[in-house]
Amino acid sequence: MDSSRITGEVLVRIERSRTPIVCNISNRHIHLTEEHIEKLFGPGYMLRKKRELVQPGEYAAEETVKVTGPRGDFSKVRVLGPPRRFSQVEISRTDTFYTGIRTEVRMSGDIEGTPGAWIVGPYGSVELSRGVIVAQRH
């Protein structure tokens, strides 16, 4: 291989390395139904967009809630929008030990047979009978 070809390949690789790789971390957050948003924040309440997420059409809302398990709770759990067909809490594996919510790694949306939690907002609270998962990487 001649030196000009090697130089060309090196320059291409250098240019590629300047392209940023997007990496996001989403440890704990919650997706809510419209019904649960109203129970937690008040009748007719609409989530306020804080920032867009990488997933098209999804956003982090200004609103936060408290998620309570049998042994502990977390305040300021970020609500993600838009509203969903069912409410779901995504926590980390470490959070399961702190809260006492014994759940497993699942794909987002796979909540059948999962434990629930109490969700507390500024207006009211909701008891989820299911929907707490440790989200599988996606």
Image (cartoon, rainbow, N blue to C red):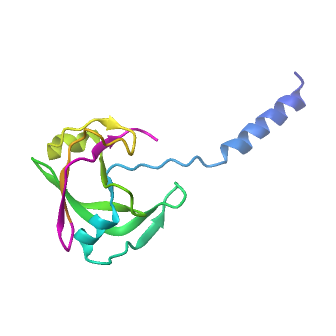
At 25% from the left edge and 76% from the top edge, which residue is drawn?
A: 42
Q: Nearer the viewer, residue 85 or 14?
A: 85
| Left or right: where 102 falls relative to 49 | left
Q: Residue furthest top?
A: 1
Residue 56 quadrant: bottom right
Residue 85 percent location from the top left of the image:
38, 56
Q: Nearer the viewer, residue 94 or 100?
A: 100
At 39% from the left edge and 44% from the top edge, which residue is drawn?
A: 108
Q: Residue furthest left?
A: 71
Residue 58 percent location from the top left of the image:
48, 60
Residue 94 quadrant: top left
Residue 37 quadrant: bottom left
Q: Is residue 128 magenta?
A: yes
Q: Nearer the viewer, residue 51 or 16?
A: 51
Q: Is residue 103 above or below residue 39?
A: above
Q: How many marks?
A: 0
Residue 101 percent location from the top left of the image:
18, 43
Q: Nearer the viewer, residue 114 or 66?
A: 114
Figure quadrant of the N terminus: top right
The stretch of residues the image draws in magenta is 121-138
At 32% from the left edge and 78% from the top edge, which residue is drawn?
A: 44
Q: Is residue 116 magenta?
A: no
Residue 32 percent location from the top left of the image:
33, 60
| Left or right: where 43 falls relative to 62 | left
Q: Is residue 10 above or below residue 108?
A: above
